[in-house]
Image (cartoon, rainbow, N blue to C red):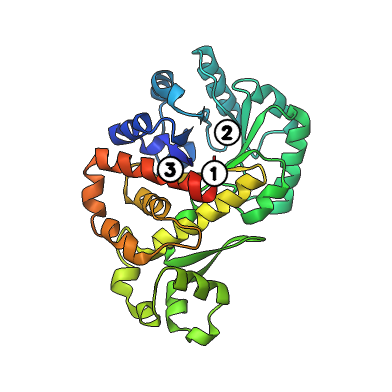
Amino acid sequence: MLNILVSYAFMNDNVVRLVKSTQGFIRWTLDSGAFSAFNAGKVIELSKYIEFCQENGHLFDHYVALDVVGNAKDSKLNLEKMVAKGLKPMAVLTSYDNVSEAKELSQAGGALCVAGGTMMPMDKYSSRIAKIRDVVGEEVWLHGLGFGRGMKVASTRIDGVDASSWEEGLRWGSFGYFVPAVGVKSQSWSEIAKTPWSKLDPRVKSCLVSLGLKRSHLADKNSLNRGAVSLIGIHTAYSWLKFASALEERGVRFNFAVPGYNQVLMNLVIAAKYAQGHGISWGSCLPDQQVANKTFRDPPKLIMDLARASKNVEKVFNIK
């Protein structure tokens, strides 16, 4: 089963349709989108978010309370207003909140988001998680927002995490490969292309071979490194699926953060649909890569592809 976190900041009819149509084989989490909106200079209206959660909250495994970036007091007021409307949101313990407040915050929905997973130093964040766990107990679900820092995540007392780092192949042209004891490492495609085959990291070479690539493919930037859906984006998503599986074996659920209904999600769909135990054949992926635009204009086909992808993920990666 795929675990996907989607932001309310990018919510539209297509996303709602997708969430509704994939119940049972996609486990969805709804982020309030407060941070995304803040970075874009926008404001999410609490009343509209409450209305959305009242109507669609049951479709999500968890939905996050609407926090106010940099304002713990107003964040708590928003939480109280959501609870007063009969909702059970996952409250957010911001970096400004004292750990002692975790217990009260977690009572709203029996779960708690811990901010700071993206920027806070690993040792400091891990220590904070441990203290929070001692305060709230073992029954409360703890979710680390943006906390996708490799296999070190599994050594903390967190239950679930999310990250958008799996998009790095698409965003930055980085070729991701999974290292069991570390997590997903990456190397820029331009660096790989100019490095002699004999000097490439053996793990990178192994990934390239599993993709069915020849040495000559490394210079083929038109087919490998351009467009919304590319080999780099697909394979890096595949590497993060292996990471998600490894985390789950250690008791931590990884959520793929997606920016809504767009072609970024297609990389994950293709990676999951064609995943095998050893890698992905680029030749197999090409047909979907070439028709990605058409697929996203055809919601029923995307839903069907997601269903196939989710079943394959559970079969190959054992992500329940």
Q: In the rendered view, would you say 84 is above or below 163?
A: above
Which residue lies under the disc numbered 3? Answer: 310
Q: Residues within 10 Å of mark 1 (few under 14, many from 20)?
A: many
Q: What residue type is labelled 3?
A: Ser
- Indicate the position of residue 198 as horizontal and vertical percent values: 52, 86
Residue at image point 61% right, 51% down: 246
Query: Dot 3 surroundings within 10 Å: few (below 14), some, or many (20 or more)?
Result: many
Q: What residue type is labelled 1?
A: Ile
Comparing 112 with 287, the one in front is 287
Q: Can residue 121 be seen in this view?
A: no
C-alpha separation, residue under disc 2 versus residue under disc 1? 36 Å
Image coordinates of residue 286 in percent, x first then y, are 29, 62
- Residue for badge 1: 319
Q: In this view, does 148 lie above or below 30?
A: below
Q: Is residue 318 left or right of residue 20?
A: right
Q: Mark 2 points at which residue?
A: 71
Q: Can residue 290 be seen in this view?
A: yes
